[in-house]
Amino acid sequence: MDNVALFFTGALVVGGIYWFLCVLGPAERKGKRALDLSGGTISAEKVQDNYKQYWSFFRRPKEIETAEKVPDFVDTFYNLVTDIYEWGWGQSFHFSPSIRGKSHRDATRLHEEMAVDLIQVKQGQKILDVGCGVGGPMRAIASHSRANVVGITINEYQVKRARDHNRKAGLDALCEVVCGNFLQMPFDDNTFDGAYSIEATCHAPKLEEVYAEIYRVLKPGSLYVSYEWVTTDKFDAENEEHVEVIQGIERGDALPGLRAYSDIAEAAKKVGFEVVKEKDLAAPPAEPWWTRLKMGRLAYWRNHIVVQVLSAVGVAPKGTVDVHEMLFKTADFLSRGGETEIFSPMHMILCRKPIS
């Protein structure tokens, strides 16, 4: 009897470990392995110092409101978080509304395909992905539209990751990635047949500066769509809880400051765009976008334990635990922002560059 009990206890333990490590898993299976977590282009011994440097920006808030400081601020952030994002979330660093009967991956893909459908590009035309990350949206959009997509990101490590993913997906003929600052893009005037940005221009210190650059590189008559991070009409700047949530999102996502939803169209018009359509894609009757964050909490705890172990044995760089904990706390602020409806990561604006 004791042997039988021991056998079943052992089987239960083994089954629990298998479920914890394999079945529960990260939010996405396709991406980075935990054993390969790094600090991007930051050497392993300097990850913790760079994490402290990142937080030091928030002790000097006026400095991250200037264009000169933003590239270093955002570049440091993405060196720290890119591998963790890929490992725990996937290759598309953004949110999407939940769709009943669809997986999170399918909902993400449909959200990305909608962006390129809105700008009405044809096969073979050249379009711009502003703030492309490791290229998850770029690959979905190139596959869907067969347009030639050029992505720009400030982070050299993301360029390398995106090119590797493009090659493995067999899409390197359609997808090109450039390292550069989207406030000073290395493209000629009137180059692109369309452009999109998915939750990326929130990193700009002034929205009109990045919109002006996008306007410059678009051909006359072309369309541009952006999914913007904003505070909604339900945000109350006098409400301490609201302020805590928004500031938590800003600190955990390298944002100079979240904009109000009412600022978006104004910035677009200021640089010359015609606003074709504006809509908060997170507003009801859309299904909540933050459910994925809540459903993934067990996986995040699992991942945090894995990161702690890997860091303790020297596989993951020192400081990785701090970065993962920061992102876990940020996920809570994002969920609270979604539940209270004071924050939206997908305020959509569709613009046209006038023909004359």
Image (cartoon, rainbow, N blue to C red):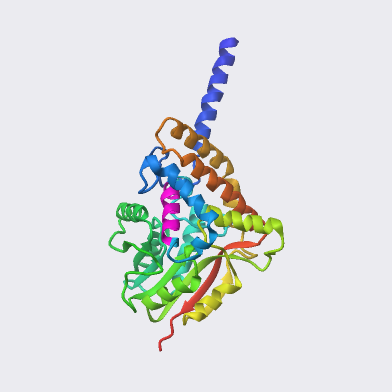
Residue 57 image point, x, y percent: 50, 55
Q: Can you say whether 112 is above or below 190 in the image?
A: above
Q: Can you say whether 165 is above or below 43 in the image?
A: below
Q: Is residue 121 visible?
A: no
Residue 215 image point, x, y percent: 42, 77
Q: Quadrant of the C terminus?
A: bottom left
Which quadrant of the figure has residue 183? bottom left
Q: Can you say whether 322 is above or below 309 in the image?
A: below
Which quadrant of the figure has residue 148? bottom left
Q: Is residue 294 visible?
A: yes
Segment colored magenta: 71-83
Magenta segment: does it hold 337?
no
The residue depicted at 48 percent of the width and 74 percent of the height is 208
Outermost left residue: 173
Q: Quadrant of the N terminus?
A: top right
Residue 96 image point, x, y percent: 53, 59
The residue depicted at 40 percent of the width and 86 percent of the height is 355
